């Protein structure tokens, strides 16, 4: 028997908003129906006429834990995600210890399984010393590899990743360019200098260097108009490349340095305002495939220091969808496209579609958010759930979900409603064996 109904919600169906009921059987969507008797259900959720849409997949987070648990851990990070309507994440490998081998993979997996309230995948790390570990990491089920820094000389590793059929996630900055400018501006301690020492040309050079190598690439946090143009051309030529953009590169600019100071330090850095319209255009014309938060929390004490000493990164997993829902309201992006870039495209690129992570259709996981689109509220760092305790988007109007469901179970309703460890590891199914051409 179908055990749960979300009654009286509005949904985007065939490009039109329709009033429907969502029937859930166990953890899966059973049916979307306009007419149904509610007497046959064990659990009834009142949608109140609010908007229902697929919960988000954020493919770029840093949930810290272990030796950096003072910044974030898997419980607080996943709670922040759930409160913002994100029910699946991919955690990147630059933790302490970094995810470079079997031992460190299981160290992180144990933490995530015991604490996370949302589903997750784990990326494998790549450096010059762990090339021999990549096959084992792939067979353990890492989602993809990276962030791999574009200036690293990792040709052998990239060749192996290509043979696996894995995605290489690239942090596109050319450190040779950056180092020269760091030397030039070393006596300038104005926070805005960070944008000068990591210029657009650095990102563009790193993107150009990796294209046309027949790799399966995903460029993280693309932030410049020329990098977007390079990726657009590569796609037209048939290259297997995707990319993401962050909310902080869509909503903030180098003009934000005065307000944020060293808290605004991130890599790649805040850009001049002229880059923002091309990023929005690329998001809407399908050049940019997805939005990811690059959630990289640090304490306010760590951030409020000299620009050269402050660690790079800002929190963002809880504010990603609320900001983008606000953008829908102001016609910067359509609701259909928002669902594509926060759910469908990440699921397809990183294999979560194999775990029934997709649209709100029969057979897919009932990962759903319910949003009152009339309830716009300003973002306040003190109300967010990351250990960071602050946000670069302070005061920005946003639309937060009223309810978040994961696999048919409410995990957020004015607070977390499930125990630690409810989240599942979305294990990638395929494996690779040396001298085996199956994958």
Image (spheres, rainbow, N blue to C red):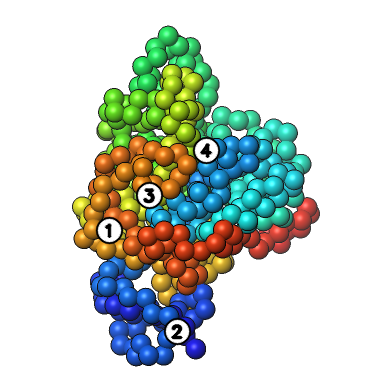
Reading the chain from its start, which is encountered first: label 3 or label 4? 4
Quadrant in which the C terminus appears: bottom right
Q: Kindly indicate whether the residue at mark 3 contacts the one at mark 1 (C-beta within 8 angstroms).
A: no
Residue ID for mark 2: 42
Cα distance between the residues tagged 4 and 1:
35 Å
Q: Is residue 40 left or right of residue 323?
A: right
Secondary structure under tag 1 reads: loop
* Residue 127 percent location from the top left of the image: 67, 35
Q: Kindly indicate whether the residue at mark 2 contacts the one at mark 1 (C-beta within 8 angstroms).
A: no
The residue at the point 76 percent across, 56 percent down is 433
Mark nearer the viewer, 4 or 1: 4
Reading the chain from its start, which is encountered first: label 1 or label 2? 2
Cα distance between the residues tagged 3 and 4:
19 Å
Residue ID for mark 4: 71
Task: Please name whichever residue, 352 or 94, is drawn nearer the observer in this view of the structure.
Answer: 94
Secondary structure under tag 4 reads: loop
* Residue 1 percent location from the top left of the image: 49, 89
Secondary structure under tag 2 reads: loop
Cα distance between the residues tagged 1 and 3:
16 Å
* Residue 130 percent location from the top left of the image: 73, 38
Cα distance between the residues tagged 1 and 2:
35 Å
Residue ID for mark 1: 334
Q: How many C-alpha atoms fall within 10 Å of the one at disc 2: few (<14), some, or many (≥20)?
A: few
Q: How many C-alpha atoms fall within 10 Å of the one at disc 4: few (<14), some, or many (≥20)?
A: many
Mark nearer the viewer, 2 or 3: 2
Cα distance between the residues tagged 2 and 3:
33 Å
Reading the chain from its start, which is encountered first: label 4 or label 2? 2
Q: Is residue 146 visible?
A: no
Residue ID for mark 3: 320
Q: How many C-alpha atoms fall within 10 Å of the one at disc 3: few (<14), some, or many (≥20)?
A: many
The residue at the point 33 percent across, 53 percent down is 322
């Amino acid at each position: 028997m179908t055990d749960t109904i979300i009654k009286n919600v509005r949904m985007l169906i065939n490009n039109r908003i329709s009033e429907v009921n969502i029937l859930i059987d166990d953890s899966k969507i059973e049916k979307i129906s306009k007419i149904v008797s509610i007497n046959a259900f064990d659990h009834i959720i009142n949608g109140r006429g609010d908007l229902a849409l697929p919960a988000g997949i954020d493919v770029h987070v840093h949930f810290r834990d272990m030796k950096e648990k003072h910044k974030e851990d898997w419980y607080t990070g996943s709670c922040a995600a759930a409160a913002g309507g994100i029910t699946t994440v991919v955690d990147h490998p630059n933790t302490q210890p970094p995810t470079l081998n079997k031992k460190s993979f299981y160290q992180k997996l144990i933490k995530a399984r015991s604490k996370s309230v949302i589903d997750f995948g784990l990326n494998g790390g790549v450096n010059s010393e762990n090339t021999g570990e990549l096959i084992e990491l792939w067979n353990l089920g890492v989602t993809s590899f990276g962030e791999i820094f574009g200036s690293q000389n990792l040709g052998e590793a990239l060749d192996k990743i290509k043979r696996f059929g894995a995605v290489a996630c690239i942090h596109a900055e050319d450190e040779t360019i950056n180092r020269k400018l760091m030397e030039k501006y070393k006596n300038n301690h104005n926070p805005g200098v960070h944008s000068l020492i990591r210029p657009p040309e650095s990102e563009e050079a790193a993107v150009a260097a990796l294209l046309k190598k027949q790799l399966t690439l995903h460029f993280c946090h693309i932030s410049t108009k020329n990098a977007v143009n390079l990726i657009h051309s590569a796609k037209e030529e048939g290259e297997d490349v995707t990319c993401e953009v962050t909310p902080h590169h869509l909503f903030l600019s180098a003009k934000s340095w005065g307000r944020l100071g060293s808290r605004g330090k991130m890599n790649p850095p805040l850009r001049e305002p002229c880059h923002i319209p091309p990023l929005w255009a690329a998001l809407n014309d399908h050049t940019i495939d997805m939005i990811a938060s690059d959630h990289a929390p640090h304490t306010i004490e760590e951030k409020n220091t000299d620009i050269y000493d402050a660690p790079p990164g800002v929190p963002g997993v809880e504010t990603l969808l609320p900001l983008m829902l606000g953008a829908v309201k102001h016609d910067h992006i359509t609701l259909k496209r928002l669902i594509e870039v926060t759910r469908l495209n990440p699921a397809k690129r990183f294999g979560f579609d194999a775990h029934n992570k997709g649209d709100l259709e029969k057979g897919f996981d009932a990962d759903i958010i319910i949003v009152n689109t009339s309830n716009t509220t300003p973002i306040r760092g003190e109300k967010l759930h990351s250990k960071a305790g602050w946000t670069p988007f302070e005061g920005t109007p946003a639309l937060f979900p009223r309810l978040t469901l994961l696999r048919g179970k409410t995990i957020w309703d004015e607070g977390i409603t499930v125990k630690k460890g409810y989240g599942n590891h979305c294990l990638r199914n395929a494996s690779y064996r040396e001298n085996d051409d199956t994958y």
